[in-house]
Amino acid sequence: MKSFYIATFGCRTNQADSAALRQDFLQRGYSEADSCEDAEVIVVNSCTVTHRSDQQVRQMARRLRRDNPQARLLVTGCYAQRDPDNVARVAGVDAVVGNTRKAELVQIAESLPGNGKRTNGGLQIPGQVELAAVYSDDFSKVRSIDRSSATQVGGKTRPFVKIQDGCDAKCSYCIIPSVRGPSRSVPPQQVIQQVRDLVEHGFQEIVLTGIHIGTYGMHLSPRYPLDGLLSEIVRIPALGRLRISSIEPMELSRRIIDLAADYDKIAPHFHICLQSGSDRILKRMLRPYNTARFASIVEHIRQRIPDAAIGSDVIVGFPGESEADHCASLDFVRRMPFTYLHVFPYSDRSGTRAFSIREKVSPAARKERSRQFRRLSEQKNRRFRRSFLNKRLSVLTLTDSQDGFRSGVSANYLPVKLDGSVKGNRIVEGKAVREEGEALYLEADFTQRRRDAETQREAEERDKGMRG
């Protein structure tokens, strides 16, 4: 049987895209290989947020080629869309497929010669590395999300449903709008049906994701806001939990926060993109809010949902960021009730407005400022985690099991460990009785452990009967 292997970089939206590609391969009769060495087709789904992301993609492509010289190797995703010619020069890559052509990837893979041979229409440049074939267009005609981009499955326990793609914002540091295209949304009926299907297949937690998820439905006709979609999804009877991925502060309406407060099915977890705690830098970033407005949103969350996880992104060392700006940003973040941070040292991206700003912050300063933010993040996360010792938590158990422990994640996004006898893909209740590294150990309710044990015994008895 034909086989494939997918390596994914970057955000949850990319993971959802990879899940859609996986479905495309499976529907065309392929099987998924356990390792790249066993695959006939290898796909690298790339990220291009930073220079480091680009470098990691190139390194991965070269390694995969070394591990499997005979496979057809394709690179797709945001790096492939942003700089296809550069990706095409990576030794061993057979084809570069931009985001605009991702829905055609399986057919493109099948059109390539086998045994790792390059195809570029016969073009061979003397004295240069043979170039890979490039399949990429601009976004001038893109106004909707096709079926292949709206994933139905993603991950072993927490599937990602991509409800939106693209971005219309003009943040001065961000390359994503040019590699993802304009904001567009999956029709609500399709999203709701996808969630229903996943629930019927037994998934307990569904994650809604997108590039600019807060703009969901703004370009549909008629408009259909995100809070309206959430209101419909929580009515699905067997749904265990719904989690919302990263959202911009100006799109996190009070209606969404209030829905999460009123419905246990919506995880009490908000990842809100701050980027800087300095009003001067926020203006230079072209962010449409100031720190006072951001703080009011966070305050409403904390008032309505006291135990909610509140995470954020911070860009450190933006061009022109002075030591005073950095201290203002650090002080603002210190005052906010964040429970974790994602810290990103600024990375120049050609094609963005910030790229042309001359006052660059030195690499040494960016590194030191990042260290300070990461240390603050660790302190906040530790304080939040320890506040739940000897308290009850609702936890989704994951497929990961090691050293007698089952991994899990609480509704408010705390890493949890449980007794390994508790099965994966369950929502269990229990008390956090101690810390285990950077996780809490949950003493699950006895009834849940007994139920799982009975299920295991029944399965073993069925297996014996079949063998007999």
Image: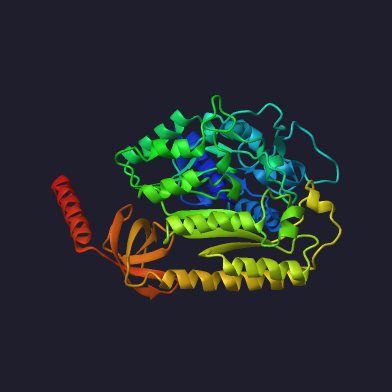
Left or right placement of residue 363 versus residue 422 in this view: right
**129 and 318: which is toward the camera:** 318
Q: Residue at x 42, y 45 (%)?
A: 259
Residue 15 spot, x, y in % from top left: 53, 47
Q: Is residue 2 above or below residue 143?
A: below
Picture coordinates of residue 422 (x, y %)? 27, 60
- Residue 419 position in % (x across, y down): 29, 66
Left or right: where 294 falls relative to 170: left
Nearer to the camera, 213 or 139: 213
Name the image quarter holding residue 293.
bottom right
Q: Decide which of 436, 24 is in the foreground and name it.
A: 436
Q: From where the camera sits, is residue 175 visible? A: yes
Relative placement, left or right, of 346 versus 185 is right
The answer to whether 37 appears left or right of 372 in the picture is left
Residue at figure coordinates x 62%, y 36% from the top left: 183
| For residue 351, above or below residue 271 | above
Above or below 194: residue 50: below
Spot occupied by residue 448 in the image (x, y as percentages of width and height): 22, 58
**Res. 152 in view:** no
Residue 441 location, quadrant: bottom left
Residue at left offset 47%, top offset 45%:
256
Residue 233 versus residue 59 in the image, above or below: above
Residue in the image at 47% along x and 49% along y: 257
* Number of numbered markers: 0
- Quadrant containing the N terminus is top left
